Image (cartoon, rainbow, N blue to C red):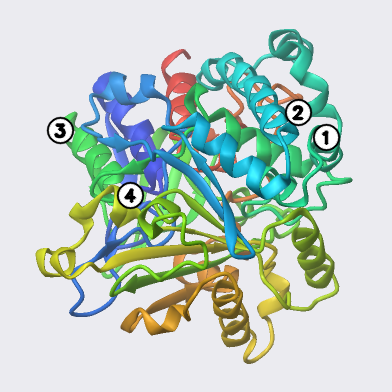
C-alpha cells in the first residue's frame, strides 16, 4: 500500500510526486513509456545530428515561479528579447522588447501611422494587469466566478465575456496586427474567435503566464524541466516504474492495475492521482467515455544548416527568428484557413509560427553544428484539426502546403537550407498514436475557465473520493505549467 499512486510521469505527475514525497508520503509513479516527461522531453530526433529537439512541448510560460522555488528546481529560463516578427510584403512587423522606439517605427511603417502602436500598448497593459491578478490564483483553491470578476476588474468583459475576435477588431484596425494578437487564442484550439469563447480561454492562458505572459526557452530543452523534476521526486523518496502501462483503476479500493513486460500487476494507493486525459481516465475506470477531444495543430521539427534569408533587408534573420515568427497569420488569413478546415479541407495557405530555440539556447546543438551556423526550427501550424488527416496522403499534403506557406514569406525556399533528413512532422493523429493523447489534443481537452464552475475545491476532484485528476485536463490545466500537479498534491495534503 502506497500513500499515493500516480498514473503517468509527465511533468504534472512529477510535480505532484515531488511535493508529496517531500511531505513524507510514500509515492509510486507508473509510466507507460521508457522515459519520464510525457510530451515535455528533449530528444535527438534525427540520427547522427547532434541537436536536442523539444519534439512536442517547446516553451515555458505557465509554470509558476512559486513551484520552481518550492521544489528547488534547477531551471534556467531565458526570456526572448524579440517577441515576434511578422513578414509583410518586402517588409515586416518587428516587436522588439529591448527597443520601444524601433517597435514603434516598425508599426508605423507597416500600418501607416501611430494608432496601432498606441492601441497595442494599451491593450497589453490591460492584459498584463489581468495576468498579474489571475496568475497567483491558479495555485490556490478555485475562486467563485464573481470573486474573479471583481479581481480582474475592467478587463473582465473583454477577456471573459465578449468573443476575443470582436474585441480585437475594436481595439485594432490593421489586419496584420489583429492577426498577430489573435494567434494566442488559436494555439491548439480549433475555434471561431468571433463567436466561440473557447478562443478566449486559450488567449487568457497565453497572456497570463506566471503573471508576465512571457514564453521562455528552457536551457537544455524541455527535457531539462522534467529531468529536474524527476530527480527531485526520486531524491525525496518517490519510486518511478517505467514501461508500466496502467490498464485499470478501481476508485473504490485504490487498486491500480498495470502491465509491463512480465505481465499484469496490481498496486494500491490510499489516493490515486491520474495524470491522463479525462477521456482516457473514463476508460480506465470502465465508465462511459465523454466526447472524444480533437487536436488541431501540425508540428514540424527541423534542423537548418543556416537561417533562411528574409525579403526584409532591414531585419537580421537572427532577430526575426529568435522570437515568434508569424507566417500568413493576418486576421483575414486566419479566418480563411478556419473556413477551409471547417469544410474538411487542408488550408491552401496554412497559418503557422516558427521558433528557433537554438538562437536563445545554443547548448541544444553539438559543437560542430554550432560552429557551422546550424539552427533548430520548430513550426506550429494552426487550424489543422485531426479530421483533416483521416485520409491517405493528407499528412504529406499538409506538410507540402505548410512549407510552401513558409516559402511565400522568405527570400529563398526553406528546403534549400534544411539539413538532409532533418524534418519530422507530427499531426494530431501522430500524437494519439505515439503519445496516447486522445484526438491528439495537446491540452487533453478544451481549456477551462480559471474559476469554479461546480467542481471541488482545487479543480482536480472527481466523482470518486480516492481519485484525483492531476493532468492537463484538470481545471486550470494545459501547457507546461505543473499547476494541476501542484493542486492535486495540495488537495491530498490538506485532507
Count residues near mark 2 (Cα–Cα under 10 Å), then give few for <14, some for 14-19, many for 20+: many
Residue farthest toward the bottom in the current orientation of the protein: 392
Q: Which residue is at 18% across, 79% downward?
A: 48
Q: Which residue is at 39% across, 36% downward?
A: 269
Question: How far apart, in angstroms, are the residues tagged by discs 1 and 3?
Answer: 48 Å
Disc 3 or 4, which lies upstream in sequence? 4
Q: Where is residue 202 in the image (x, y as percent from the top left)?
A: 67, 41
Q: Image quadrant of residue 260?
A: bottom left
Residue farthest toward the left in the current orientation of the protein: 367
Q: Mark 3 points at which residue?
A: 235
Question: How far apart, in angstroms, are the residues tagged by discs 3 and 2?
Answer: 42 Å
**Dot in front, 3 or 4:** 4
Q: Name the one closer to the observer, 98 or 64.
A: 98
Identify the mark at residue 222; answer none if there is no mark: 4
Count residues near mark 1 (Cα–Cα under 10 Å), then give few for <14, some for 14-19, many for 20+: some
Q: Name the residue under label 1.
A: 167
Q: Mark 2 points at which residue?
A: 159
Amino acid at each position: 500500500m502506497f500513500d499515493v499512486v500516480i498514473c503517468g510521469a509527465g511533468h504534472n505527475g512529477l510535480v505532484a510526486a515531488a511535493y508529496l514525497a517531500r511531505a513524507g508520503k510514500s509515492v509510486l509513479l507508473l509510466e507507460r513509456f521508457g522515459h519520464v516527461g510525457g510530451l515535455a522531453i528533449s530528444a535527438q530526433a534525427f540520427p547522427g545530428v547532434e541537436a536536442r529537439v523539444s519534439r512536442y512541448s517547446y516553451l515555458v510560460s505557465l509554470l509558476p515561479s512559486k513551484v520552481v522555488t518550492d521544489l528547488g528546481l534547477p531551471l534556467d529560463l531565458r526570456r526572448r528579447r524579440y517577441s515576434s516578427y511578422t513578414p509583410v510584403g518586402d517588409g515586416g512587423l518587428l516587436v522588439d522588447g529591448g527597443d520601444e522606439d524601433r517597435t514603434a517605427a516598425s508599426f508605423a511603417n507597416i500600418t501607416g501611422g501611430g494608432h496601432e502602436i498606441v492601441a497595442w500598448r494599451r491593450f497589453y497593459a490591460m492584459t498584463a494587469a489581468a495576468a498579474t491578478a489571475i496568475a497567483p490564483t491558479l495555485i490556490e483553491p478555485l475562486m467563485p466566478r464573481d470573486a474573479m470578476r471583481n479581481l480582474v476588474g475592467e478587463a473582465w468583459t473583454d477577456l471573459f465575456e465578449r468573443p476575443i475576435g470582436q474585441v480585437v477588431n475594436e481595439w485594432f484596425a490593421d489586419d496584420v496586427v489583429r492577426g498577430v494578437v489573435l494567434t494566442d487564442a488559436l494555439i491548439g484550439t480549433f475555434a471561431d474567435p468571433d463567436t466561440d469563447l473557447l478562443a478566449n480561454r486559450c488567449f487568457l492562458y497565453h497572456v497570463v503566464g506566471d503573471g508576465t505572459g512571457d514564453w521562455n526557452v528552457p536551457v537544455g530543452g524541455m527535457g531539462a524541466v522534467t529531468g529536474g523534476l524527476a530527480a527531485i521526486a526520486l531524491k525525496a523518496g518517490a519510486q518511478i516504474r517505467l514501461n508500466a502501462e496502467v490498464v485499470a483503476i478501481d476508485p473504490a479500493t485504490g487498486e491500480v492495475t498495470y502491465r509491463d513486460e512480465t505481465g499484469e500487476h496490481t498496486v494500491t494507493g490510499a489516493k490515486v492521482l491520474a495524470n491522463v486525459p479525462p477521456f482516457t481516465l473514463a476508460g480506465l475506470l470502465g465508465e462511459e467515455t465523454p466526447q472524444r477531444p480533437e487536436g488541431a495543430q501540425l508540428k514540424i521539427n527541423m534542423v537548418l544548416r543556416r537561417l533562411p534569408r528574409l525579403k526584409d533587408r532591414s531585419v537580421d534573420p537572427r532577430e526575426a527568428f529568435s522570437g515568434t515568427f508569424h507566417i500568413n497569420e493576418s486576421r483575414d488569413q486566419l479566418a480563411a484557413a478556419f473556413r477551409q478546415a471547417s469544410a474538411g479541407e487542408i488550408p491552401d495557405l496554412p497559418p503557422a509560427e516558427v521558433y528557433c530555440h537554438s538562437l536563445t539556447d545554443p547548448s541544444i546543438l553539438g559543437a560542430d553544428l554550432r560552429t557551422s551556423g546550424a539552427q533548430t526550427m520548430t513550426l506550429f501550424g494552426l487550424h489543422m484539426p485531426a479530421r483533416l488527416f483521416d485520409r491517405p496522403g493528407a499528412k504529406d499534403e499538409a506538410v507540402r502546403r505548410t512549407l510552401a506557406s513558409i516559402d511565400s514569406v522568405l527570400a529563398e525556399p526553406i528546403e534549400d537550407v534544411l539539413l538532409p533528413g532533418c524534418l519530422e512532422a507530427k499531426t494530431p493523429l501522430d500524437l494519439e498514436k505515439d503519445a496516447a493523447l486522445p484526438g491528439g489534443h495537446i491540452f487533453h481537452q478544451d481549456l477551462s475557465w480559471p474559476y469554479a464552475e461546480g467542481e471541488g475545491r482545487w479543480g482536480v476532484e472527481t466523482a470518486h473520493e480516492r481519485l484525483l485528476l492531476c493532468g492537463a485536463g484538470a481545471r486550470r490545466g494545459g501547457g507546461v505549467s505543473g499547476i494541476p500537479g501542484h493542486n492535486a498534491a495540495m488537495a491530498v495534503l490538506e485532507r
